[in-house]
């Protein structure tokens, strides 16, 4: 059984921020910023793609609710919501979860997208691939 399944069933203790029948939100053991919270479905799904759209929608509802709870309680400037799906994307626990990350001035957390602009032909080619699905 994975570590988040154990947290969900109470085998491993956690600092719970929110709980309902199917979801749990708890403080990340390693606080990237103060208030760093994880939101999970209690049922084990490997990553975001393992959720069907209804399950994803239910999980996002809890993400929204818990985000607002954090916002009301903590005096932060800004906020990131993050899901890592797959090891290459930084997923280390293979039970789907969203990171809620309160952001403060000088909090030291670096989230940088070093993007590159495509040519018009490249954008059209890319869009053709995506929109063929
Ligand atoms: P990932 O890298 O998979 O997106 O994030 C996994 C997160 O789970 C990490 O931020 C890590 O600190 C957190 N984590 C791992 N084990 C535990 C644990 O036993 N308890 C809690 N509260 N967080 C954990
Ligand atoms: Zn699990």
Image (spheres, rainbow, N blue to C red):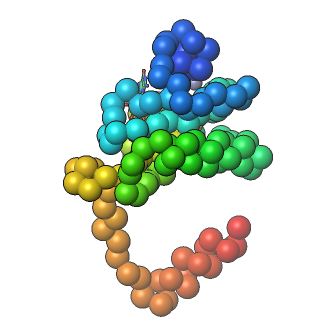
Can residue 56 be seen here? The reply is: no
Count of marks, rendered view: 0
Q: Is residue 52 above or below residue 96?
A: below
Give the residue at the far top of this rendering: 11
Instruction: From the top left corner, tell me how far across and down residue 97 is, in percent.
Output: 54, 38
1 lies left or right of 93 = right
Residue at left offset 71%, top offset 67%: 133
Instruction: From the top left corner, tell me how far across and down residue 44 is, in percent.
Output: 63, 27
Q: Is residue 120 above or below residue 47?
A: below
49 or 36, nearer to the observer: 36
The quadrant the N terminus occupies is top right
Residue at left offset 59%, top offset 78%: 127
Residue at left offset 55%, top offset 42%: 69
Can residue 102 be seen here? The reply is: yes
Ligand 1 quadrant assignment? top left
Instruction: From the top left corner, tell me how far across and down residue 23 is, in percent.
Output: 66, 31
Residue at left offset 55%, top offset 81%: 125
Instruction: From the top left corner, tell me how far across and down residue 7 is, in percent.
Output: 53, 18
Using the rendered view, name the quadrant where residue 19 is placed.
top right
Give the residue at the far right of this rendering: 54
């Amino acid at each position: 059984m994975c570590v988040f399944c154990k947290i969900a069933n109470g085998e491993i203790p956690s600092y719970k921020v929110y709980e309902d029948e199917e979801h749990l939100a708890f403080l990340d053991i390693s606080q990237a910023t103060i208030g760093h919270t994880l939101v999970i479905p209690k049922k084990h799904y490997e990553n975001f793609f393992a959720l069907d759209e209804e399950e994803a929608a239910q999980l996002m509802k809890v993400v929204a609710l818990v985000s607002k709870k954090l916002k009301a309680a903590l005096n932060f400037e800004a906020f990131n919501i993050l899901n890592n799906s797959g090891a290459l994307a930084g997923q280390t626990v293979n039970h789907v979860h969203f990171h809620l990350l309160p952001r403060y001035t000088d909090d030291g957390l670096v989230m940088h997208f070093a993007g590159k602009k495509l040519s018009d032909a490249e954008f059209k080619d890319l869009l053709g691939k995506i929109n063929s699905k």
